[in-house]
Amino acid sequence: MTWPMVKLHDICRPKQWKTISASNLHEEGFPVYGANGKIGFFAEYTHEFPTLMVTCRGATCGNVHISEPKSYINGNAMALDNLDAAKVDIKYLYYFLLSRGFDDVISGSAQPQITGQGLTKVEIPLPPLAEQKRIAAILDKADAIRRKRQQAIQLADDFLRAVFLDVFGDPVTNPKGWEVRPLGQISTFENGDRSSAYPSGDDLVSEGVLFLSTKNIVSDTLSLESCQYITEDKYMALSRGKAKRGDLIITLRGTLGSCCVFDCWHEKAFINAQMMIIRPDSGVGNIFLHDLLVSKAIKNRLQSIGQGAAVPQLTAKQLKELLLPIPSIQEQKRYEKIRNSVLTSIKKMQSESGVGLFEAITQKAFRGEL
């Protein structure tokens, strides 16, 4: 089915309103929307009715939201004012823009931004209004399923963190009196190879040995969505920075203390100089040590001792001197058994999260196939 395409500017008037500084926000009043949702309250409002807005500055540039009635939309979000309700349904437009994205509209590298001029590139498929409302209602239901499953996943993750504290106690106050030892006494360390921190040219290949950087640690788990590989010859020539399955990898620069277990199907990998390999001794499980290092209390400590204002960094010496409570291996294994059960449930919910279903339905909706 082919629907007419209309320019975004033909159905609304994108506008940036005056930005309210954080110091002028109130604890109550009319909600204020910033770059990524509500940020506080103000005594006045700019929009009496729900309004579609697009984040137009910063790292979240391109995010899409709909405001509550009687809200203030500040200059970090582009308000799509004067939306022609006789031609377009606001929820239909919201889902379309969410699906479309703004990669071809965002400009600027140091500070990403979307301008009113940039939005002139955006065109909208416009079926009859009744069809728009039908599509929006279907996508509302699919989105609700997705959100409920994501909430369940978050609750399971929160439960796992609570189990860790219940079994071992707070790692800083150590209420259960576990033996406290420096990290350097319970594990060995291996740096990334600084002389070859960033392989390039013929060293990089489409298949080979994994070359990991800090972007491969996401939410304290190994992420291989964006990978690079080096040749086997390059890997063999390296003197250090060689990770093997079961190793812990921790970041030393930028986002301090992000940590993952190298647990994918690859047997080995090479890490860059911004990371460190940690290999726990036989009396310390890698799963327990990982969860200890990424606990809120220990992460806060790592971030507090990081050096450098522009680019914070940790040193091997700081990590080796980090004091940690170490329970018995039996307690570690008891926790790991509970953890495996919870993670199995989380993975099942993730596979049924509805994200893929929502995306598939969205794509069909805007192709006129629903």
Image: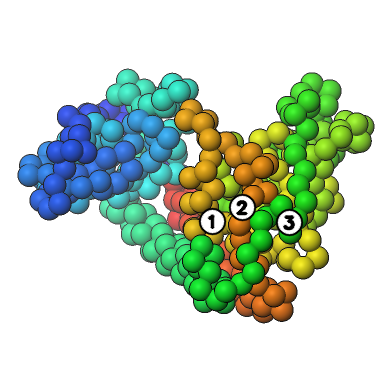
350 w.r.t. 363: above or below: below
Q: In which quarter of the image is the C terminus?
A: bottom left
Which label number is shown at residue 322? 2
Q: Position of residue 330 (x, y in %)?
A: 71, 79
Question: Contact, CB < 8 Å: mark 1 with mark 2?
Answer: yes
Crowding at label 2, few (<14), some or many (≥20) Cα neighbours within 10 Å? Answer: some
Residue 323 visible in the shown view = yes
Residue pointed to by mark 1:
298
Mark 1 vs mark 2: which is more N-terminal?
1
88 w.r.t. 164: above or below: above
Secondary element at tag 2: loop
Question: Contact, CB < 8 Å: mark 2 with mark 3?
Answer: no
Q: Position of residue 259 (x, y in %)?
A: 63, 51
Of circles 1 and 2, which is in front? 2
Residue pointed to by mark 3:
185
Q: Which of 84 and 74 is in front in this view?
A: 74
Is residue 131 found left or right of 162 in the rendered image?
Answer: left
Marks 2 and 3 sit apart, C-alpha to C-alpha, by 10 Å
Crowding at label 1, few (<14), some or many (≥20) Cα neighbours within 10 Å? Answer: many
Q: Which of 32 and 268 is in front in this view?
A: 268
Q: Looking at the image, which residue is at 31% across and 38% down?
A: 35
Q: In which quarter of the image is residue 238?
A: top right
Crowding at label 3, few (<14), some or many (≥20) Cα neighbours within 10 Å? Answer: few
Marks 3 and 1 sit apart, C-alpha to C-alpha, by 17 Å
**Total numbered badges shown on the rendered structure:** 3
Q: Looking at the image, which residue is at 21% across and 38% down?
A: 22
